[in-house]
Amino acid sequence: SQTIHQWPATLVQPVGSPLSLECTVEGTSNPNLYWYRQAAGRGLQLLFYSVGIGQISSEVPQNLSASRPQDRQFILSSKKLLLSDSGFYLCASQTGMNTEAFFGQGTRLTVV
Amino acid sequence: GEDVEQSLFLSVREGDSSVINCTYTDSSSTYLYWYKQEPGAGLQLLTYIFSNMDMKQDQRLTVLLNKKDKHLSLRIADTQTGDSAIYFCAAPPGSASKIIFGSGTRLSIRP
């Protein structure tokens, strides 16, 4: 099975500061990679997904961007954080369609 | 586009059965999944069902699928305090790469 590493686990950042969250995957190759955000008490919102290196699809217009510089590395970034960017960010990996998605343990981001 | 809907909250008494429901719109899903999220953690796969099955039982868990109505349910028998969590259903579309989850159902257990 796959292992998803996300860091940091928690992060407190001031408004207007940059952001970089990293996700790496072990145990597979050429996975589909996903970034989700979960606001407090809410469901999962798909932010970005990637089917290969350099291929990023954005699901919602927002203050964030994603990049996939290597096959098993997915990065979520922002140049200037907003208060509304606070939330729990989850990275997921899936190999092939219609298969199980594996999740990292998440990063709790608080923008102050 | 694809849509997956769930009720937001469910409260059951310890020892009773819990039934969590989900409806989806994309009928091309080959597998449908139930995930469990404990507080402050990521999602863990709980169980899944192949789309040509009506029912799957796994110990205390029973998954029912009504493909005609696009309705999926998860039944937890003899609900315990350790079952307190948010439960998400997912119906990955067969023709696309992205996975859409329901809003999650928060299951709380009362004594």
Image (cartoon, helix red, strand yellow):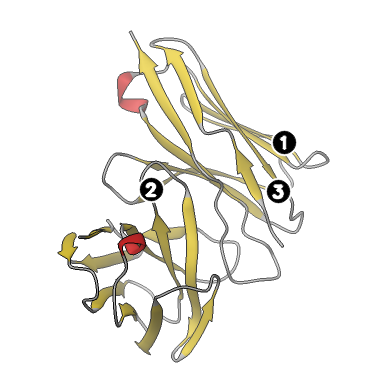
Q: Chain of mark 1?
A: B
Same chain shared by disc 2 and disc 3? yes
- The answer to which of B48 and A76 lies nearer the viewer is A76
Name the element at disc 3.
Answer: loop
Label 2, label 1: how many angstroms apart (C-alpha)? 23 Å
Q: Going from the N terminus, do you reach mark 2 or mark 1 first?
A: 2
Q: Quadrant of residue A68?
A: bottom left
The disc labelled 2 sits on which kind of residue?
Answer: Gln
Q: Is residue B104 left or right of residue A16?
A: right
The disc labelled 1 sits on which kind of residue?
Answer: Asp
Same chain shared by disc 3 and disc 1? yes
User: Where is mark 2, residue-wise?
Assistant: B44
Q: Chain of mark 3?
A: B
Point out which mark residue B51 bears: 3
Is B96 placed above or below A87 here?
below
**Is the C terminus of chain A in the top left, top right, bottom left or bottom right quadrant?**
bottom left
- Look at 46% across and 24% down and name the residue there: B60
Is A110 placed above or below B52 here?
below
Is any atom of residue A16 visible in this view?
yes
Label 3, label 1: how many angstroms apart (C-alpha)? 8 Å
User: Label 2: how many residues lie within 10 Å, few (<14), some (14-19) or many (20+)?
Assistant: some
- Look at 56% across and 62% down and name the residue there: B99
User: Where is mark 1, residue-wise?
Assistant: B54
**What x and y, as percent, mark residue B89?**
55, 44
**What x and y, as percent, mark residue B91?**
62, 53
Q: Is residue A77 left or right of residue B33?
A: left
